[in-house]
Amino acid sequence: MSKDLSIEFCGRKFINPFTIAASPPSDCRERIERAFSAGWGGAVLKTTSVENEKVDLVYPMMGGLSYRNQRHASFYNIDLISERHIEEICDDIRYLKERYPEHMMIGSIMAGSRADWEELVHKLEDAGADLIECSMSCPQGEGDGTIPVNDAALTEEVTGWIRDARRKNTPIIVKLSPIVTDIAVIGNAAKRGGADALAAIDTVRSYAGVNLDTLEPQLSVRGKSLYCGLSGPSVKPIAMACIADLSQNVGIPVAGIGGLTTWKDAAEFLLLGASNLQICTAIMKYGFGMIDDLNSGLLNYMDEKGFDSLGDMVGKVLPSFAAHEDLDRSVKMVSSIDKELCIGCNSCYVACSNGGYHAISLGGETPSIDESKCRGCGVCQSVCPVAGCMNLKKHE
């Protein structure tokens, strides 16, 4: 029997784990239709609100992260939730479920009071949403302005409201922010409140930068701006840490979000414990057609490694995590240079002289390594621009 990419998440069968995250790509019925026709497994519609919630967007709302004049795939944004309110979103869910019954439709909601949460849950369930994702980054009711996902007690309380509002036991996903002291503490609070799964991570709070010529923000709205949300490949290491932490220390399914762009990224997220994969930024850069490479690459990897199903991959790498004091110190490693690959940039020399152990010297056609000084710290390998040129080997 040939392998497929189907996977179960919160009791729902996804034809593949690739899901459009709550974002501009999912804020349009026609876009989701194109995505499903292309082969995406599910969609989280852009986060919506009750009908009387005013959503007043500003423009421009997005920018691209650059560094030393090099453009990157990462985005920052000051976008808010969807301008389309719950009734319009529910119409989309009904329409899409009728035409694409095998594809998972996930409603994403945000509210500021218990009554509003309850209304949104009821309407999504009536519309036939397969799952409900809850974005808890809005202060609640008459409180002190605390954001639920920044506070364990409030996360547990609000999740409980949402759990109790259900009439059809639709699975609840609580979306978490990485900007907390301990994301597992918040994850466990959501679990106690009744969450069936967690989504990690939301965008990372950041600042777009300053235009040094105009002295205005880089993401300027007529000279003014504010903190923004960073997404894309630059946040992937943060997302992986959060996914692994939640997978090890909470024990309910995790939807992985944050910088996922290639099938290799997808494999890493699965191996670290995610069983659903949400993508936004890469879609805006490469389009919905990227699903072909995601699917084929992941299937080929499964064949290469002998995985019979995606479920076999989930969390496979988690046993490799260890406390610092338990890491092996018995083997000494040293750096080595592949002289055929070396381009003579001397980046390794600069790094070792200023952040290593003065083990690299210049003088010949390529740098030389004094193995008696080298401790195998890896700084030279980290800065080398040529893949495979600098390597670590066991000291003989």
Image (cartoon, rainbow, N blue to C red):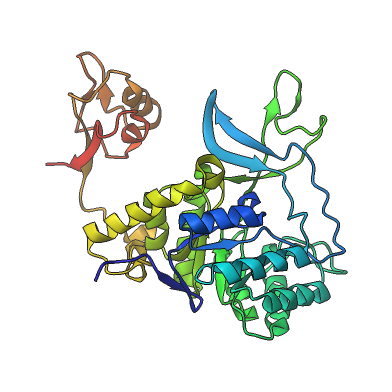
Q: Quadrant of residue 150?
A: bottom right
Depth check: give the residue in front, 224 or 9.
9
Residue 45 in sight = yes
Quarter occupied by the C terminus: top left
Question: Would residue 49 be found to the left or right of residue 331 on screen?
Answer: right
Residue 135 in sight = no
- Residue at the limit of the structure toward the left, as seen here: 396
The spot of residue 226 in percent (x, y) is: 76, 41
Residue visible at 32% across and 23% down in the picture: 349
Query: From what the image shows, is residue 14 above or below residue 59?
Result: below
Question: Would residue 337 be found to the left or right of residue 154 on screen?
Answer: left
The spot of residue 298 in percent (x, y) is: 34, 56
Question: Would residue 34 be found to the left or right of residue 122 on screen?
Answer: left
Q: Quadrant of residue 5?
A: bottom left
Depth check: give the residue in front, 233 or 48.
48
Depth check: give the residue in front, 208 or 380.
208
Residue visible at 22% across and 25% down in the picture: 341
Residue visible at 70% across and 30% down in the picture: 218
The spot of residue 16 in percent (x, y) is: 43, 64
Question: Would residue 289 be found to the left or right of residue 92 on screen?
Answer: left
The spot of residue 248 in percent (x, y) is: 44, 69
Quarter occupied by the N terminus: bottom left
